[in-house]
Image (cartoon, rainbow, N blue to C red):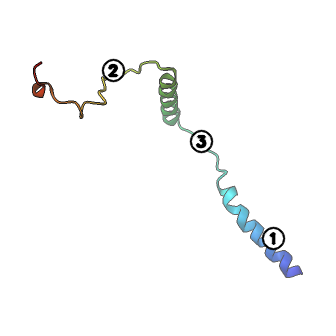
């Protein structure tokens, strides 16, 4: 019975070991904080529908539509 208790305690300790390894303190540098803020601001702007600072026109059908020179005259 004593061996069973020791084995159970050992298995419990081994099972909880990975969980304690994940509890590291995360110290963020100023550069990482700045990058996080930029990502958060871009996400909020996209979620609100505000235009971003890069005004590139995107044509999702550009590869499907024929080029201007290939169009037939009406």
Query: Quick check: 14 left or right of 28?
Result: right
Task: Provide the secondary structure element on which disc 3 rests.
Answer: loop
Task: Provide the secondary structure element on which disc 2 rests.
Answer: loop
In the rendered image, the quadrant that contains the N terminus is: bottom right
In this rendered view, identify the residue nearer to me: 15 or 49: 49
Q: Which one is in front in this view, the residue at disc 3 or the one at disc 2?
A: 2
In this rendered view, identify the residue nearer to me: 70 or 28: 70
Residue matched to label 3: 27
Residue matched to label 1: 9
Determine the residue positioned at 46% across, 18% down: 50
Mark before the other along the chain sequence, 2 or 1:
1
Task: Provide the secondary structure element on which disc 1 rests.
Answer: helix
Q: Residues within 10 Å of mark 1 (few under 14, many from 20)?
A: few
Q: Which one is in front in this view, the residue at disc 2 or the one at disc 1?
A: 2
Q: Which one is in front in this view, the residue at disc 3 or the one at disc 1?
A: 1
In the rendered image, the quadrant that contains the C terminus is: top left
Disc 3 to disc 2, how far (Cα)? 35 Å
Please say if the residues under marks 3 and 1 sit with CB atoms less than 8 Å apart: no
In percent of width and height, residue 66 lies at: 18, 30
Residue matched to label 2: 55
Please say if the residues under marks 3 and 2 sit with CB atoms less than 8 Å apart: no
Disc 2 to disc 1, how far (Cα)? 61 Å
Determine the residue positioned at 47% across, 26% down: 42
């Amino acid at each position: 019975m004593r061996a069973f208790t020791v084995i159970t305690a050992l298995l419990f300790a081994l099972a909880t070991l990975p969980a304690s390894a994940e509890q590291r303190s995360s110290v963020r540098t100023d550069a990482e904080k700045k990058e996080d803020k930029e990502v958060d601001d871009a996400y909020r702007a996209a979620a609100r529908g505000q235009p971003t600072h890069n005004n590139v026109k995107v044509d999702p059908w550009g590869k499907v539509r024929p080029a201007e020179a290939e169009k037939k005259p009406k």
